[in-house]
Amino acid sequence: MDKVIYLDNNATTKVDERVAAKMMPYLTERYGNPSSIHSFGGSVMPDIEDARRAVANLIGANFRNKDNCATEILFTSCGTESDNAAIMSAIATQEGRKKIVTSKVEHPAILSKCKELARLGYTVSYIGVDNRGRLDMEELKREIDNDTAIVSIMWANNEIGNIYPVEEIAELAHAKGALFHTDAVQAVGKVPIDMSKNSIDFLSLSGHKLHAPKGIGVLYIRRGVRFRPLIVGGHQELGRRAGTENTASIIALGEACKIAAAQVAEEVKLLSSMRDKLEAELLKRIPKIRINGDLDSRLPNTSSISFEYIEGESILMLLDIFRICASSGSACTTGSLEPSHVLRAMGLPYTAAHGTIRFSFSRYNTMEEVDTVLEKLPPIISRLREISPYWSEK
Ligand code: PLP
């Protein structure tokens, strides 16, 4: 079977072999419960703390506070849990404030939670974006008010890759006494992040987007910010998140963060060179295509391209014959052929939104793979346009 050309790294990534090797002993040999009195289990706890330190190092967070307690890095089960926990904690601790400000282009992990809270009587303000997916900063400033409990704006968008001015938005939120959360699930490991240089209160990240396994995430909680747990039960994570620690995955995430910290600067160059070549060559070879997003401020690995007058799903199926994996703009609304909420918020014409494909790169991709896509994709587009009732060369 041909080798897979995996260009869907914003959906999930391959576990780095160094990460898999590091986690394995915690599944088969060192499987004791880290909270045990016996040393077989208890001896695992320092390794969890080492992993916590590695996560903290990658994002410039504090590892310990003055009482030598673990702070700022809270292990969760995934990015979705971290997002939910931040919002729920903020509305619980910001009593009397009944408003949430977010954007139209957030991940469903935020949007669905906000929808639920709206049904419970909270006001939710969804800030719009322009045709390049850039936030309407004037609307944002108007909407953050003295009733706002939390503002949640993603660091980087999963579909178009836009990077948002989250450090500035945190200041705007604080000026009105609101907390600020950022969903950095797509940003961590792809762009440098230094929490010691901003005032963001909460940040979510997810292991499976940075070459650790699925099912492990982190919520960063700035020192001094009050936190109400989402999951209650045992006293793990200093009482902030109950449930026996997912030891092997925590160790894996620590290792993935060490690797990312050592490689992030180099990887940015590698990822953007592959993305830029793909885009530049496709623009030369295929008429009527557009690159979506803010070309001046976006992730180095993400390319959202609209092939006008054809269906993204048909492109994906034909790419799949060559074992090339990408995703369409409607990835989050599987089962429906509606364009994604992100493309709709940007006001992309129907004929472009439907033919949108996201290519997302990782350290495992190569220029040879880009060349293969450049060879296989143009004939696919021509073929589909020939049978499209909407296509006209003129
Ligand atoms: N936030 C963003 C921006 C994402 O891209 C994703 C996953 O696609 C999530 C949150 C959810 O993360 P997880 O799959 O770890 O729950």
Image (cartoon, rainbow, N blue to C red):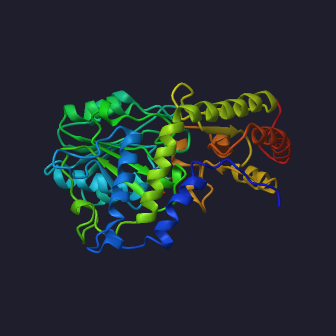
Q: Position of residue 5 (x, y in %)?
A: 73, 50
Q: Quadrant of the N terminus?
A: bottom right
Q: Position of residue 377 (x, y in %)?
A: 80, 42
Q: Quadrant of the C terminus?
A: top right
Q: Relative to 330, is 307 above or below?
A: above
107 or 383, which lies in front? 107
281 or 252, which lies in front? 252
44 left or right of 235 in image: right
Q: Position of residue 85 (x, y in %)?
A: 31, 56
78 left or right of 282 in image: left
Q: Relative to 216, is 384 above or below?
A: above
245 or 147, which lies in front? 245
96 left or right of 268 in image: left
Task: Please state the total of marks drawn on the protein image.
Answer: 0
382 left or right of 131 in image: right
The answer to whether any part of residue 28 appears in the image is yes
Q: Relative to 51, is 302 above or below?
A: above
